[in-house]
Amino acid sequence: MTDQSQSEANRVWARLRTVFGAGRSRRRVLEPRPGSTPFAKGRDPLSVSAVLDSVTDSLGWRTPIARGDLAAAWRSIAGAETAKHAEVEGYADGVLLIRCDSTAWATQLSLMRSQISDRIARDFPDAGVDSLRFLGPNTPSWNHGPRTVQGRGPRDTYG
């Protein structure tokens, strides 16, 4: 009985070898690809800065990173005294928004617009800043809701 079961197993094995290729070897011989040999030309490792540049370009991070660098370097762009009274608030459609402590500082910075925009264009070309907008201080708004009454504004109605 063992001869019969063994012969059946041998027959199945022979059949499988003929169906799935008896002459093929299991291991493939890999042909070396051009440039994949060690110490070949073009196999030098890349620098970290080159790798990070390619990653930021491929993911589209160059403009946001340049804008962050611009906001961090605002003190050196505007000057130490000016930076005490004005700070970068944000970006909107290529416009750099700068919030000032007072309207006088906003006026002063608007007179310095050309120097500041030239410095930004020279030092941060990837930031995508087309123009500058200087904003005065935030003032409280007494308007609540879409409907307001025309008039003098808030009045002394507390007593």
Image (cartoon, rainbow, N blue to C red):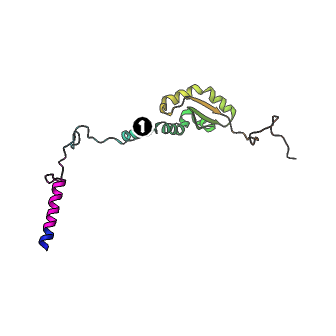
**Residue 128 placed where, x, y %?**
51, 32
Rendered location of residue 35, percent (x, y): 23, 39
Looking at the image, residue 133 lies above or below residue 52? above
**Residue at horizontal 55 percent and vertical 36 percent from the top:** 74
Q: Residue at x 36, y 42 (%)?
A: 48
Location of the N terminus by quadrant is bottom left
Task: Answer left or right for 17 relative to 72.
Answer: left
What is the span of residues highlighted in magenta in the rendered image?
7-30
Q: Kindly state the secondary structure of the residue where label 1 is placed.
A: helix
Question: Outermost residue, left direction?
Answer: 3
Q: Residues within 10 Å of mark 1 (few under 14, many from 20)?
A: few
- Count of residue discs: 1
Q: Position of residue 157 (x, y in %)?
A: 85, 44
Side of 124 where 23 appears, left or right: left
Q: Residue furthest bottom?
A: 1
On the image, the x and y values in percent for residue 114 come to: 57, 25
Whether residue 69 sits left or right of residue 36 in the image: it is right
Nearer the observer, 7 or 106: 7
Frontmost residue, 111 versus 148: 148
Q: Is residue 117 above or below residue 74?
A: above
1 w.r.t. 54: above or below: below
Residue under the image location 19 percent in, 46 percent down: 30
Q: Which residue is mark 1?
A: 57
Task: Say what amino acid the circle numbered 1 marks.
Answer: Asp
- Residue displayed at 50% across by 34% down: 127
